[in-house]
Image: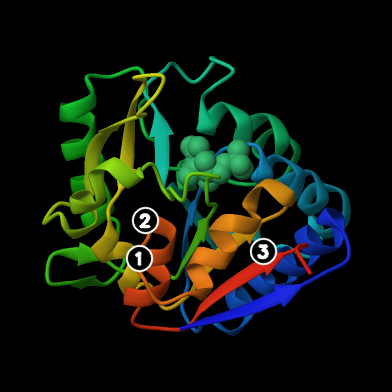
């Protein structure tokens, strides 16, 4: 199940997804809102919009931030998802650092996937069949149909019994640590941010019925309605 929200520009799309997140945080009747963020280039612009237009109205102290995936590089590397988020968002807002839970991209990948999954499991968010239930998950989709760092050549990772696994980028060979399918499809609010022409084929795949790739799989297997924010009319 998916609902597509379409806007005229990438900035309007970013505004809409930030507003949606703020509304979800607002109605959540609990002290903390557990949000998992994705990396890549699309969220950088969304974080800029968040800082410029919505920082003052965001209850930063009620947020607990996690990552959907991380590249296995140090946080200072230009490829680091945490590093990108720090630069575009965290360095500019009043987010308490003890509520930011980064994936250690510089650590041994397998050991880190295990550590992070355990840390998330003990963070206080609800668990279901051993999987954490994030209040919301922000996802992107790659032109090849990947989401999180689950690529089309490793669809079986979507059904992993582990919450986080080590994945490998199919062309660069870069190791990644990635949230798997079960925690994603169980989250009550999965929000995809997809802007730019390159995403049109994958958006089309997500709207069709076949599990053509990881992003399409998430839409078809989600237990709750998935929301897609896009500028692709
Ligand atoms: C990552 C991501 C990944 C991303 C897509 C889209 O670390 O790369 O979390 O899943 O969302 O690759 O990336 P772009 O926004 O760069 O197109």
Q: Nearer the viewer, residue 79 or 88?
A: 79
x and y percentages locating residue 106 in the rendered image: 35, 17
CA separation, marks 1 and 3? 33 Å
Q: Measured from the top left, where is residue 149 in percent x and y?
A: 38, 41
Residue in front for this viewpoint, 230 or 89: 230
Determine the residue positioned at 37% across, 29% down. Answer: 169
Q: CA distance from mark 2 to mark 3?
A: 32 Å
Q: Are marks 1 and 2 in contact (CB under 8 Å)?
A: yes
In the rendered structure, the answer to whether residue 110 lies left or right of residue 199 reads: left
- SS under mark 2: helix
x then y, percent, for residue 34: 44, 62
Q: Which of the numbered marks, if any, corresponds to residue 52?
A: none
Q: Position of residue 110 (x, y in %)?
A: 17, 28
Q: Residue at 32% across / 75% down in the picture?
A: 221
Q: Which residue is mark 1?
A: 217
Q: Nearer the viewer, residue 208 or 78?
A: 208
**Residue that numbered label 2 is attached to:** 214
Q: CA distance from mark 1 to mark 2?
A: 5 Å
Q: Is mark 3 within 8 Å of ligand 1?
A: no
Q: Which residue is mark 3?
A: 59
**Label 1: how many residues lie within 10 Å, few (<14), some (14-19) or many (20+)?**
many
Query: In the rendered view of the protein, which quadrant contains the C terminus?
Result: bottom right
- Label 2 neighbourhood size at 10 Å, few (<14), some (14-19), many (20+)? many
């Amino acid at each position: 199940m998916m609902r597509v929200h379409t806007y005229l520009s990438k900035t309007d799309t970013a505004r809409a997804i930030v507003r949606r997140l703020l509304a979800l945080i607002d109605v959540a009747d609990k002290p903390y809102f557990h949000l998992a963020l994705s990396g890549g280039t699309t969220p950088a612009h969304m974080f800029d919009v968040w800082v410029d237009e919505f920082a003052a109205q965001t209850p930063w102290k009620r947020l607990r931030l996690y990552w959907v995936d991380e590249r296995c590089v140090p946080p200072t590397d230009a490829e680091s998802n945490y590093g990108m988020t720090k630069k575009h968002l965290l360095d500019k807002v009043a987010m308490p650092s003890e509520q930011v839970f980064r994936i250690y991209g510089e650590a041994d990948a397998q050991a880190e996937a295990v550590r992070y999954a355990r840390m998330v499991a003990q963070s206080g968010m609800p668990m279901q069949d051993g999987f954490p239930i994030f209040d919301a998950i922000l996802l992107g989709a790659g032109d090849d149909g990947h989401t999180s760092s689950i690529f089309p050549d490793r669809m079986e990772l979507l059904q992993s019994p582990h919450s986080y696994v080590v994945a490998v980028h199919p062309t660069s060979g870069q190791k990644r640590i990635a949230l798997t399918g079960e925690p994603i499809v169980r989250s009550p609010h999965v929000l995809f941010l997809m802007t730019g022409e390159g995403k049109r084929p994958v958006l089309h795949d997500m709207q069709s019925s076949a599990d053509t790739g990881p992003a399409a799989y998430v839409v078809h297997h989600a237990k709750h309605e998935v929301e897609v924010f896009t500028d692709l009319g």
